[in-house]
Image: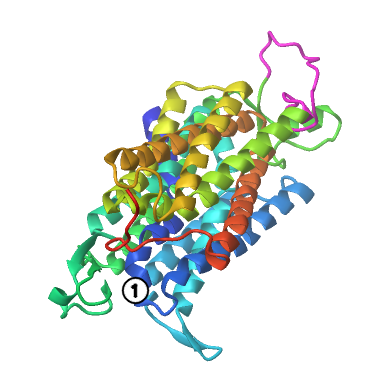
Amino acid sequence: MALLTHVLACLFGIGSWVAINGMWVELPLVVPEIPEGWYLPSYLTVIIQLANIGPLFITLMHHFKPGALDERPVIYTIVVMGVVATFLLAFLWKHTLVVGGAVHSVALLSLSFLLSVVDCTSSVTFLPFMMRLPPQYLTSYFVGEGLSGLIPALVALVQGVGIVQCKNATANANISMENSTWGSSGELVAHYQQANFSAQVFFLFLSVMMIVCLGAFLMLNHLPAVAKERKCERYLDDATHREKAGVGLSLQNSAPEQKPMLDSSESPLKELRSSFGKGTFSRAQLVFIFVVLAWVNALTNAVLPSVQSYSCLPYGNQAYHLATTMAAVANPVACFIAMFVPNRSLVLMAVLTVTGTGFGAYIMAMAALSPCPLLVHHDMGAALVVITWVVFVLTLSYVKVIIGVILRDEGHSALVWCGAVVQLGSMLGAMSMFPLVSIYELFKSGDPCNTKCPK
């Protein structure tokens, strides 16, 4: 039944970020229908950062009252909230209200905030919950987390989101202003094709995905085969360590903190290199691990996604869709590789981080040069930017899995801090890019049909 547990862990991981990832890929259909227009991505960025109040509360609870908070009720709450919010979003996303003398999509923004709380809080609850399962299932969870970005992207491709055709403005005078960007007579205009199915259907699909996550979580908690997996693992509750130290806590009233039992061959007087987790790593190594974790998540979750359209769209709509889809594929592929080639080397982590950052620098350079980046008139340019995005995501996703496996071995509290640092890195990345993109407008987008670049 190990395969079933792997599948359930993967389905559980899909629910971690599927709602917010789905919101991002659906923007081309949502934006033309709401008063906020293309300011919506900026609003979403701020909303997601405000939602970090959820992870902050969980992290503070674990710090000041260790063992007092059980993740399971919190997970049930946020996943059910995700199911309800995505369902309501399907029917209310177009509804507007007048606030402060201006029309706003209050329902869309409010439900987006709830979904952001769900997804942000999952970082500090889903990972610690995986401590209850044997270590090999953590990689399956990371595969699911990667699929939470891939699946909405693939559905959006089938839906036909953002597909542009260039047509002559004078020959298409009957095209409505809602679907076109008009230029002067004789110019080409960008005409967005009608989607194969509506945004309402897409949001209902996201609700179904959250229901699948809820079902997987229920089975991970109550399925006898999964319970047997937990019992087969030779784990010693952290309360037992405290009891041996004279704390006097009973095993039944302890926190769910779990750590692997020492093999008989290991020395019982093993020197602790720090007070964190099992003391495997020194303080300097822990600082390095968490700095890398924050840096990698800042790049992959905020910095580079905020300029993805600027780096890809100048090479054409096909290059943009290939880059977004293949990059989404690269995430779970990296997790699959980690499943069969596990590695805990800090040296490899550093090499992959530098490599991924180098590819990220190329992406940022192309975005800064938009709308006329290097090789914009050559197929090689499009191929390079797609390959760069794939390698960037592949290398840094593998780094995240390495860190997750390392911290999983350090215990429950280490995974709580892992989730907190993931959110901290993402928040710092978003806060740094928001003024550059939305306020100072350092990145320029060209007209997909009329931008002329020197050859």
Residues shaded magenta = 262-283
| On-image quarter of the N terminus | top left
Hey, which residue is sitting farthest left in the picture? Answer: 171
| Camera-side residue of 318 and 70 | 318
**183 relative to 313, above or below:** below
Q: Position of residue 247 (x, y in %)?
A: 85, 35
**42 relative to 305, above or below:** below
Hey, which residue is sitting farthest front in the picture? Answer: 454
The scheme the figure's colours follow is rainbow
* Point 50% across, 22% down: residue: 342
Hey, which residue is sitting farthest bottom in the picture? Answer: 101
Q: Quadrant of residue 389?
A: top left
- Amino acid of disc 1: Pro
| Residue position for label 1 | 32
- Is residue 77 part of the magenta span, yes or no? no
Q: Position of residue 138 (x, y in %)?
A: 51, 34
Is 67 placed left or right of 185 in the picture? right
**12 relative to 441, above or below:** above
* Point 61% across, 27% down: residue: 350
**374 relative to 334, above or below:** below
Q: How many marks?
A: 1
Q: Quadrant of residue 450?
A: bottom left
Can residue 372 be seen here? yes
Can residue 133 be seen here? no
| Camera-side residue of 101 and 405 | 101
Q: Position of residue 121 (x, y in %)?
A: 58, 54
Hey, which residue is sitting farthest right in the picture? Answer: 246
| Camera-side residue of 401 and 176 | 176
* Point 76% across, 33% down: residue: 276
Q: Secondary structure at mark 1?
A: helix
Dot 1, crowdedness within 10 Å: few (<14), some or many (≥20)? few
